[in-house]
Image (cartoon, rainbow, N blue to C red):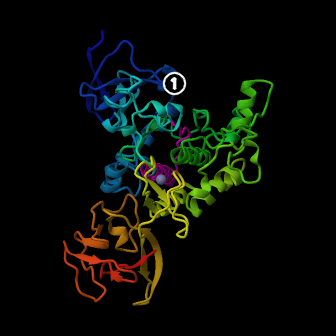
Amino acid sequence: MKNGDILTATLESGETLEYVFSANPPRGGMKHTFFTPDRKYAVQFFNNPRDAQSMLMQERIRSIVSIYNPTLSEKQGGALGNTEKTADYFRTKFCWPVGVVKTPEFGIVCPTYPQGFFFGENASAVLPLKGKDKKSTWFTGRNRKYLNKSELGDFRMMLKIAIGLARSVRRLHQAGLAHSDLSCNNVLIDPKTGSSVVIDIDSLVVPNKYAPEVCGTRGYIAPEVLATMERDSNDPHRCLPCVQTDLHALPVLIYEYLFLRHPLMGPKIYSTESAEKDDHLAMGPMATFIENPDDRSNRPDDLDVTISSLSEGLEKLFLQAFVDGLHNPSERPSAMEWESELLRAWNRLVPCENEDCDKKWFILRDEKEPVCPFCGTRKTQPLLKLGFKSNIRGKHGIFRDKTEVYVYDGMPLFDWHLFSNIHNDEKAEPEMRAYIRRHNDMWLLINNGAEGMLSPSGRLVPKGTAIELRDGVLLCMADRENGMLAEATVI
Ligand SMILES: [Zn+2]
């Protein structure tokens, strides 16, 4: 065989797939990869034939492709409870294997990463990045300074990436799976659009069924896994990657996205004996959060923006993950808690008024102190808050507060702003139902197709028309079951 030869793989489903032979294919720790002629799919084989022949490995991969697959509807043999719609949604969030190769040897077929996760022509003036995949270290580590500004996104996009990742991990855990090797290498991000994709799915751990094969990646391995790594694999005290270790890696990544620094890498020296020992202690048994409020030994001198610059809810979760839960895995917040707290913070985002501010957005924690924590600019323009209220079940006309959102010019409103039983998640329709405009010093809400929207005087607001959101205005977002009221407050 020579480079460029077209070979045929037969899948266990009976389908065939052509791929291009390469004498020197890209090789990872466990597998090497060939591509289909159109490069839409990667065909991967194991480096070690023993892995390929392991029945346990084969069985695990078959279950990942089928009954644990959130990118395939339950009808088509995918994960339980998965609809076409949620499958479509998660197909954009995971690079999930789509098939098992039977011949020429056991292997897997994965979609290639979408184009947005590869650097383009103008990514860097210094480094030859074209075609490289967008591992998150490019954006959160030292190399960030070599990237062109257009690649970097802003704080809002980084928060969006965090929400997407928390949602993906929540979906895995919901299905009973653990990723086991979440890291900057296995999550690709595109800060331009705020999207993320989780890759290397085939190392997934199915709890109580298939043991993990990898320990994880430096900086993301949970301290207890690192601390017990030297023990025998049958030793009951050895900690292996599982859901709880994902719940360490997840907030490490979220912290990196929001602050562009690692939560455990500070100035503290743990051992002068050797660099290896120092590193082992720093990431393992002695790990200390750089923002630990009670132990400031690992705190850098130049921490300007800290977790107290985020929402109260996020600050609490970071303390729970990196203080209470750092050496106490059962204390770590769940992926679902991260997802909902990040969404609550998303609702509190406001644009910074300083045109030169890199971050462009910040989370408004205290209405009395509307100051961007990144550049110190105080907001001078009026702020408007929409408070959404839901009808208490069985009590007609009695409402309670559900969520609060700070509005901005151009803000879209979706079904989760209209109905109390719809949440901002994979099940919601993506259509914009209304939007906000700042026009002639007025805040306007324009109906873009929400049915049954009523003005404060109870008149129907047809599509394409606007309501002015003055202080104290109360409007009905949808005069339907579970429809919410929205109250405007000028701050
Ligand atoms: Zn700013």
* Horizontal side, residue 372 vs residue 38: left or right: right
The magenta segment is 156-184
- Give the amino acid type for the residue marked by disc 1 in the picture: Gly
* Horizontal side, residue 177 vs residue 327: left or right: left
Secondary structure mostly seen in magenta is helix
Task: Out of 297 and 48, give the one closest to the viewer.
Answer: 297
Relative image position of residue 151 (x, y in whole percent): 38, 38
Farthest top residue? Answer: 2
Residue 208 shows in the view: no
**Element at label 1:** loop
Which image quadrant for residue 112?
Answer: top left
Against 283, is 330 above or below? below
Relative image position of residue 244 (x, y in whole percent): 62, 48
Report crowding for label 1: few under 14, some 14 to 19, many 20 or more residues within 10 A (C-alpha).
few
Q: Is residue 169 magenta?
A: yes
Relative image position of residue 374 (x, y in whole percent): 52, 51
Relative image position of residue 227 (x, y in whole percent): 73, 36
Task: Out of 11 and 343, give the one closest to the viewer.
Answer: 343
Q: Is residue 9 magenta?
A: no
Against 165, is 441 above or below? below
Q: Is mark 1 within 8 Å of ligand 1?
A: no
Task: Out of 146 and 183, give the one closest to the viewer.
Answer: 146
Residue of label 1 = 29
Residue 321 shows in the view: yes
